[in-house]
Amino acid sequence: METFPSVGSPGLWAGFIAFVIAMLALDLGVFHRKAHVVKFKEALGWSAVWVSLALVFGAGVWWKFGPEPGLQFITGYLIEKSLSVDNIFVFVVIFSALRIPALYQHRVLFWGILSALALRAIMIFAGVAMLARFHWLIYVFGGFLIITGVKLFLQRNKEDNPEEGALMRLARRTIPSTPNFDGHHFFTVENGRKLATPLLMALLLVEASDILFALDSIPAIFAVTTDPFIVFTSNIFAILGLRSMFFMLAGAVEKFSYLKVGLSAVLVFVGAKMAIIDFVKVPPEVSLSVIAGLLGASIVASLIKARHTPTGDADAPKV
């Protein structure tokens, strides 16, 4: 069976995993030991920390292994980071629908993302193994991304209601639950029965949405590189910064009205790149420029539209 070359030695793998565990312990055990509402300034600071760490790591990859792996990491990180913004829209809807207090949202996201890290690792290594054994799957992934991009564009104005979803209906039928909160606990006891609180229901929906998100994002990065270490590290850095980005952007997601258009274009681009990978080699710097250009244009267009749309105008046209 073919194996993909990787820049990651056993020592680098062990060091990176140790770094992730240490940062998670520092996050929950020190900075967020007590439940509190994460304000914009704090979220902005943490977002800057995570982005800076990712850029420093990318610079280290560039310095040690050369410009191509360095560009692959930065491009992969940009893809994962931009697609994770779409997940923020979903998180906002989940917390709003289940009326999760801002005080406990960080706890839900922390445990949701912690489990997402494990699931993401499994999916990445499974994807690498499948591509190594069945090369033709690269075309399947490419076609899937193109279809997903078109679907995202066509459904860009669709509003989801998590409470009416199949997962929530199944969870409520199989898991005894209560609509009442018990502080930051996922379970409580009422009349001698152990019941799930709305926090557990929110956690289940957050985890389910991340699995669906991974089905798009992981194939997308395979269009950039098949190096398991680059794929894994760029994914993990994007996921680690997702919580702080949520609290930074949650109140402003409606302003990014053209973002889904940009994300759909990115998915179509990387899908097409994957579909023609054996015939046309797109240089890493070209991929990075195109992806950054598409996302930048959608963000600028969104901000211009938001500036010219009166606040609270319910009749403002949607994209």
Image (cartoon, rainbow, N blue to C red):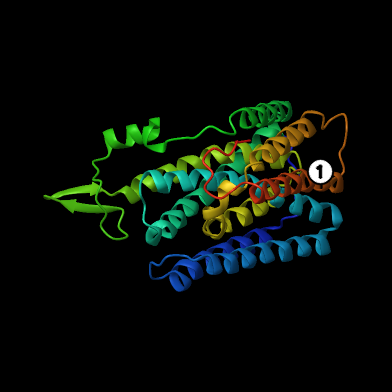
Question: In this view of the protein, can residue 316 be seen by the observer?
Answer: yes
Left or right of 80 in this view: 182 = left
- Using the image, determine if residue 65 lies above or below residue 284: below
- Residue 34 at x, y percent in the picture: 38, 70
Residue at left 63%, top 50%?
A: 235
The quadrant of the picture occupied by the C terminus is: top right
- Using the image, determine if residue 214 lies above or below residue 244: above
Pick whichever, 282 or 265, lies toward us.
Answer: 265
Pick whichever, 23 or 227, lies toward us.
Answer: 23
Residue at left 72%, top 39%?
A: 266
Q: Which residue is mark 1?
A: 290
Total number of numbered discs in the rendering: 1
Label 1 environment density (alpha carbons within 10 Å; few <14, some 14–19, many ≥20): some
Q: Residue furthest bottom?
A: 30
Left or right of 165 in this view: 319 = right
- Residue 221 at x, y percent in the picture: 70, 42
- Residue 229 at x, y percent in the picture: 69, 52
Label 1 is placed on what type of residue? Answer: Val
- Residue 252 at x, y percent in the picture: 56, 53
Q: Residue furthest left?
A: 191
Task: Write down the quadrant of residue 74 in the picture.
Answer: bottom right
Residue at left 25%, top 43%?
A: 177
Pick whichever, 147 or 113, lies toward us.
Answer: 147
Residue at disc 1, secondary structure: helix
Question: In this view of the protein, can residue 5 be seen by the observer?
Answer: no
Task: Write down the quadrant of residue 37 in the picture.
Answer: bottom left
Task: Write down the quadrant of residue 52 in the picture.
Answer: bottom right
The quadrant of the picture occupied by the N terminus is: top right
Left or right of 158 in this view: 306 = right
